[in-house]
Every structure is written in structure tokens, then in C-alpha cells.
Amino acid sequence: MSRNVKELSPEELCAWLAERGEAGYRARQIARWLYARGAESFAAMSDLPRPLREKLAASFSIPRPQVVRLARAEDRTRKLLLALEDGGRIESVLIPAELGERLTLCISSQVGCGMGCAFCATATLGLARNLRADEIVDQVLEARRELLADAAAGEPQSEITNLVFMGMGEPLHNYDAVVRAIGVLTAEWGLGISPRRITVSTAGLVPQMKRLLEDTRVHLAVSLSATTDAQRRRLMPVDRKYPLETLLAACRELPLPRRRRITFEYVMLAGENDSLEDARRLGKLLRGIPSKVNLIPFNPYPGSRFAPTPRAAIEAFRAALLRQGVHATIRESRGREIQAACGQLAAQVA
Ligand code: SF4
């Protein structure tokens, strides 16, 4: 079976070309075809000499994941369930902002997840495997194809403006592939997305958080969802390894670029972590950290043991944070009828 050309780094592609007496600049041309233009065959790469296209086609393939299911919500949220070559299934979700031009793509970094967060549908699948960098990038290419197909069908043309690693998996558990994918996503020869428009969300893997901010310029989001270790251990087993004190001390020392803040995500679970006492503790915990809090209404899934916090209580929680000087927002729930929360669709068809 020929090798997937997207698994090669630019350096590897240059070396392959050099071995065949081809100029190194061809690597950049090929990459632009693969990523900027989403070419599906070497024959389509019309500014490459025909003999080179033939050599490429003899050695490499350009496989695509299969779109197994495409679910659309009334609010134009779209969820793609993708099948990988080994049968693994992952999800990506296109989320248009309620107001404005923002169109966010939420992507996966693993097939399933091993972190075991008690409020997450993906956790019920367990971890099957890490995604390769090209499988992470393919999610963006497939979502772009969907948008192009929509435009061809007469819908307004739209482009992905933001990327979040908040789909299936713990991205920092798959560190090397995620950083390599970020390289392709942000490179001028790749997808040319500004790193400021990419957010990597972690359950709190402390050593990799620091590395990520040294190796890339992306935003960091930390899923907190609790204000005491006892509470967090019930919800997020990662707390046993990196308790709140360790996690937040690391956040205070992270090498953040100027005017950057860490986003702390907080899933609101009725009667678990949503009291005004929690809001007061949260404000105290975040003192001294350049931060903002994103309150996430819980999206129930079949078999989950939690209930969503009522809207009025979420607003009161937010107001208590604002009174303490903590910047806090409430994430709007999108795509409820298509089970847009991470892992729900894959769990349904697994
Ligand atoms: S919330 Fe994220 S880290 Fe936790 S189990 Fe779900 S996918 Fe994994």
C-alpha cells in the first residue's frame, strides 16, 4: 500500500524530492495543493511537471477519512462523524456564533479518551488510540469541504475562523502529534491559520501545559469544573495526579505572551459544583492568574448521572465571579438536538 503523503513532514518531502533530482521548492508547491487547496489527487496539481506527478502517484496516496454521518442543527451547528482507515471514529463540530462572523471548528485529538471525566460522553468510550497529526489536520480539510459543498448548494460562503481542540480526547496526552498538527495548521504553506485563533483545551496535564506555551503560540484552556480537590476528584480523576494547588501554581508561572489570559472552563452541574460558595472559592483560586472563566451549561447525554444547572443559577454564579473581578462568560449551548457535546454521536453509533 502506498504511503499517505500527508504523513510526511516538509523536510521528509524535500528529502524524497532531492533523492529523485527534483528541486526542494516543489515540496512547498505540493503542500499548498494538499492543504490550501485540498487537492484529492496528484493529477490535479497542475503546476507540477507531469513526470513528477506520476512519480508522486506511484509512491504516495492522498487518503481521506470517510464522513459517516453529518448532523445539522437548526442553529446551523454541524457535527461530522468521521471513520478513519482502521475503523476508528472521531467527531468534529462546526459551530457558528449566534452573532457575528465567527465560525469555530471543534476537533478531536484521540479516538475516545482515557481521562475519565465523569460529565463527559467521550469518557464512556475509553481511549482507543492517539490520532496522527495528519488525522487531526484532515478534520479541518473535511469541514472545509462541507462548507464548500454548502456554498455550491447556494448557502452563504463561510470560512472557519477559529479552531478549538475540545473534541474527543485529551490533546496534551497526544502532545507530539498535536504540536505537529498545529505546525501544519499555522504554516504559510499549510492552512495559514493564526495561532491566536487556535485554543488547546486540557484537563490539566501540568508538564505539557508549560511545554505547549514554549513550543507554540496557541491559546490554552484548562478544564477546572471544581473548587475543591474532593469535588474535582469525583469529577476529574486527573486531580489525583495534579491537584488544584499544583495546577494553579503552574498556571501562575506559565510563560504567557503579553495580554494573554488562560481560559478556565467550568461545566455547570446541578448540586455538584454550582453553589455561590463555589463561585466565591473559584474567585479566590484564580487570584493572580491572568484568566477568564467560561461557564459551560451541561449538555446531558444518555446514561449521564448529572443534571444541568438552571439558567438563573448560572447567571447568579457568573455575577458572583464578576463581583470578585473575575472575567466570566456563559457559553451558549449550540446544536442540542444533534447531540453536539463531544463524544455523544460516536457513543451513539459505537
Ligand atoms: S472532558 Fe475531555 S479530557 Fe475529560 S474525558 Fe472528556 S474528552 Fe477526555
Image: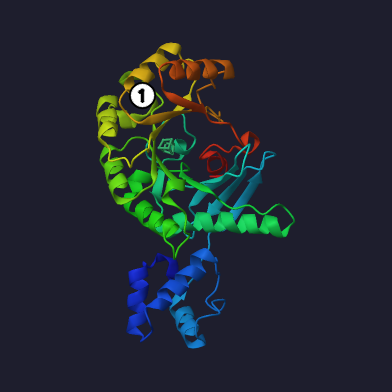
Q: Residue at x 56, y 49 (%)?
A: 81
In the image, 174 versus 26, the foreground residue is: 26
Instruction: In the rendered view, tell whether residue 307 sits above or below residue 137.
Output: above
Instruction: Using the rendered image of the protein, determine whether residue 270 is visible from the camera's viewpoint.
Output: no
Instruction: In the rendered view, tell whether residue 265 sits above or below residue 278.
Output: below
Residue 38: percent from the left, percent from the top? Answer: 54, 65
Q: In this view, does 96 lie to the left or right of 176?
A: right
- Give ligand 1's quarter of the image: top left
Q: Which residue is drawn at 50% across and 49% down?
A: 90
Residue 22: percent from the left, percent from the top? Answer: 38, 84
In the image, 120 versus 154, the foreground residue is: 154
> Residue 346 occupies which quadrant of the picture?
top right
As helix, strand or loop, the secondary structure at mark 1 comes to: helix
In the image, 71 versus 101, the foreground residue is: 101
Residue 10: percent from the left, percent from the top? Answer: 37, 69
Instruction: In the rendered view, tell whether residue 47 sits above or below residue 10.
Output: below
Q: Residue at x 40, y 77 (%)?
A: 25
> Residue 255 occupies which quadrant of the picture?
top left
Instruction: Using the rendered image of the protein, determine whether residue 35 is visible from the camera's viewpoint.
Output: yes
Tell me which amino acid carries mark 1.
Arg
Tag 1 residue: 232
Q: Which residue is drawn at 32% across and 22% down?
A: 287
